[in-house]
Image: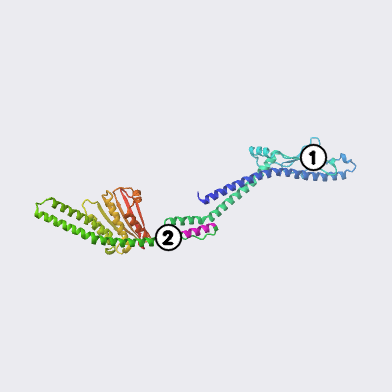
Amino acid sequence: MRLVLQLVARLLVIVALCLGAATVWATIDAYRSVDRATEASAERVSQALEALYWRELLLRSNRMREQLLPAPEWRTIETMGLIAPGICVQFEPAGAFEKPLCGQSKGIGKAPPRWFAATVQAVLGDHATVQRPISARTATAGTVRATSDPDAATALAWQHILDNIHVALLMALAIALLASLAIAHTLAPAHAIVTALRRMADGEYRTPLPRVRSMDLAMIGRAVGDLGDRLAEAEEERTVLTRRLLEIRNDERRTLARELHDEFGQNLTAILAFANTIEASAGDKYAAGTEIAQDARMISQATRRIMACLRDTLNRLRHPPAEELGLEASLVDLVDSWRSRAATQPLIQLDMQGDLADISGTVAATAYRVAQECLTNALRHSDAREIVLRIERRTGAENALLVRVEDDGGGDAAKVAQSAGFGLTGVSERVAALGGSLSIARASHGLSVAATIPLAA
């Protein structure tokens, strides 16, 4: 899972926990607010009855104080306005058939679910009854007893919870949305850093990164940039060393070719001449077909085969003709030489696309070596009936030369890539030294070896 999604998921969990805690707190506060409303109602009604008591006491001075009780007028609309919804007030001592005076409880809220009422009742318990004396100086004046209606109190608590939860839910959603946007904006440079690492894995080491305000991401970005610079420098040094190694190898190949030509070539020519002389002498002195003549003839044949192999080796060791004849002419000559060796050779097709006239130097020599090595492997190590050598010049932004050799001789591309001999290893190093790439893949009925060589090399 992406880091942004992980952080947003954790944020949503935290918001859900906070919302649950807010719900619990709102439930307790709403339930306890009924107790506060009961106390407030008892206090207000007791103060109003105390004022009524003292007023009646002054107006009815001929009556004894012990016989004086609040007048029936205390059950008025004004008194009822002092009582909170869901609270009932009773004056004690109560008169005959006198009922408590209750605040208006209809329409104060929706009926709560049964599970809520049962849970609140079981966890928080019953509401307390509040009593207040009408007069602290006269105990015989009576008391006010306030109680809460359980159903009305639960409905009030439920409505209070709904109101608070709606607000809390909106705030939670807003916080989650804004925080998610902030997290996504803060971690947006991480995508650029990952993209840069992927480009570095593909060989684009110097990939510019955007400026980051976050200190941690900025440190990571600088570390990635420094790593890219070091890799680019190492790659440049490796390329220079590889090119130098190839130059040294070419010099050694030319030296070896010259020594083979001068030493082995002359000796083989001498052996062939001696064998021909022996064969001719034996034919003159003895009957034709004698053992000496046959041995001399076999020596001549073996010498010719060795000289043919030597010529082939010298052609491979000498400087490629692509630098002298040009890439197009050298490839035509290479294919014609393979076609003319034997009639049983597979069909070799040459497909050249694009203008190859101005391709010369190291690029031409490398392309020729790739084609030469791939054709040699296809002819010697497979049962191919058809081989296609395709040279394509790609212009535009790519600006590269594609050399591809496909055959229908079967084979496992993975095994060939793992067990590549000196030939493929050598051409792979040549191509890499020019900043290109060599790949071995499965073709329709065989193998496909493709090399991409940048023309700007």
- Residue 95 x, y percent position in the rendering: 81, 36
Q: Which residue is mark 2?
A: 234
Q: Are marks 1 and 2 in contact (CB under 8 Å)?
A: no
The answer to whether 4 appears left or right of 294 in the picture is: right
Q: Compared to 32, does 393 lie above or below?
A: below
Does residue 239 appear in the picture of this structure?
yes
Res 325 → quadrant: bottom left
Tell me if residue 225 is in the magenta stretch: yes
Does residue 364 appear in the picture of this structure?
no
Q: Secondary structure at mark 1?
A: strand
Front disc: 1 or 2: 2
What separation in Å lies between label 1 and label 2 (alpha carbons)? 97 Å
424 or 257, which lies in front? Answer: 257
Tell me which residue sits at (34%, 61%) in the image: 246
Q: Residues within 10 Å of mark 2 (few under 14, many from 20)?
A: few
Three-letter code, disc 1:
Phe
176 or 52, which lies in front? Answer: 176
- Residue 273 x, y percent position in the rendering: 16, 58
Q: Which residues are magenta?
A: 216-227
Three-letter code, disc 2:
Ala
- Residue 135 x, y percent position in the rendering: 83, 44
Quadrant that contains the C terminus: bottom left
Q: How is the image coloured?
A: rainbow
The answer to whether 238 appears left or right of 290 in the picture is: right
181 or 315, which lies in front? Answer: 315
- Residue 47 x, y percent position in the rendering: 80, 45
Residue 164 disc label: none
Q: Residues within 10 Å of mark 1 (few under 14, many from 20)?
A: many
Residue 91 disc label: 1
Q: Earlier in the sequence, mark 1 or mark 2?
A: 1
Tell me if residue 89 is in the magenta stretch: no
Work out which residue is located at the far right of the displayed protein and give it: 62
